[in-house]
Amino acid sequence: MTKTTLLCLLCLTLGRCNAWASTGSTNPSDFNNPVDWCTNFGCGGGQLGTPQAWSASIAPNTGWVGLVSSQNMQNLQQGTSWNGNFANGMGILYNGVNTIGNTPGGILVSFTQPVFGAGAYIQADFFGAFTSSIDLFDARFNPLGSFSAAGSSDTNVGTALFIGAYDSIADVSYALFDTTANGFHDEDFAIGTMRLATIPVTTTPEPSTLLLLGPSILGLAGVVRRRMSRKGVL
């Protein structure tokens, strides 16, 4: 089965059912192995098809990344082609390349070698408050748990929210990143540097925002909303 088929299958079958085991964190230091998108794809602003292969900074961790909608992504860079709050020069993956009349969907990452967990810097493509989420799945797409955290989207460089989740054993094969704002799912958003937990995470859990898996990830299509974009530096 191809990776594209797997992504489509996940898009059709995920329903966020029962959660167990996973815990969330907003501390990037809890995750030890970075994945730099500029290193993998460059930062030229070109479109990337779904899925794309990536490699972590520390071998042998590899995997694939794409949108659950199977649409194209775009590789951008803070301070050059993205005017947001990621660290200056950070490479990002943006899901909103083809958003006219449709919803781009969440960003799904697969791990060739199962890990304890993963996380990434994240920012919604509009100015204001938003809620981000990460869902973890095992190799058979069984849900392991979900974590959400509130963030603020602005141009205060270096303050982007980091959101991650992890399990007590290395059984995480997929991580799904998404955002919600103003009551709508699947807002346009970008993720910056991703970090993997390839060793057990020993940190204090953040239970106040740990979720039982709830509504569908498919989101609301055709929503017309006003937003302030930062796809180009002003």
Image: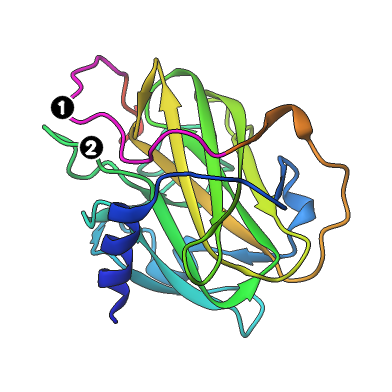
- Can residue 78 be seen here? The reply is no
Q: Residue at x 32, y 74 (%)?
A: 3
Which of the 4 image quarters holds residue 206?
top right
Q: Residue 44, image x and y in percent?
A: 31, 58
Q: Secondary structure at mark 2?
A: loop
Q: Residue 47, image x and y in percent?
A: 23, 58
| Magenta residues, start to end | 213-227
Give the mark, 1 or 2, whose residue is nearer the N terminus: 2
Q: Is residue 49 left or right of residue 214?
A: left
Q: Residue 103, image x and y in percent?
A: 23, 37
**Is residue 54 positioned above or below 205 on the image?**
below
Spatial distance from mark 1 to mark 2, Cα to Cα? 7 Å
Which of the 4 image quarters holds residue 146?
top right
Q: Quadrant of the N terminus?
A: bottom left
In the rendered structure, which amino acid carries the disc numbered 2? Thr
In the rendered structure, which amino acid carries the disc numbered 1? Gly
Could you tell me if the residues under marks 1 and 2 are in contact, i.e. CB atoms within 8 Å?
yes
| Scheme by which the image is coloured | rainbow
Q: Which residue is denoted by mark 1 in the rendering?
A: 222
Q: Residue 166, image x and y in percent?
A: 70, 55
Question: How many discs appear?
Answer: 2
**Is residue 108 positioned above or below 163 on the image?**
below
Q: Residue at x 37, y 46 (%)?
A: 106
Q: Which residue is denoted by mark 2 in the rendering?
A: 103
Disc 2 packing (10 Å; few <14; some 14–19; many ≥20): many
- Can residue 80 be seen here? The reply is yes
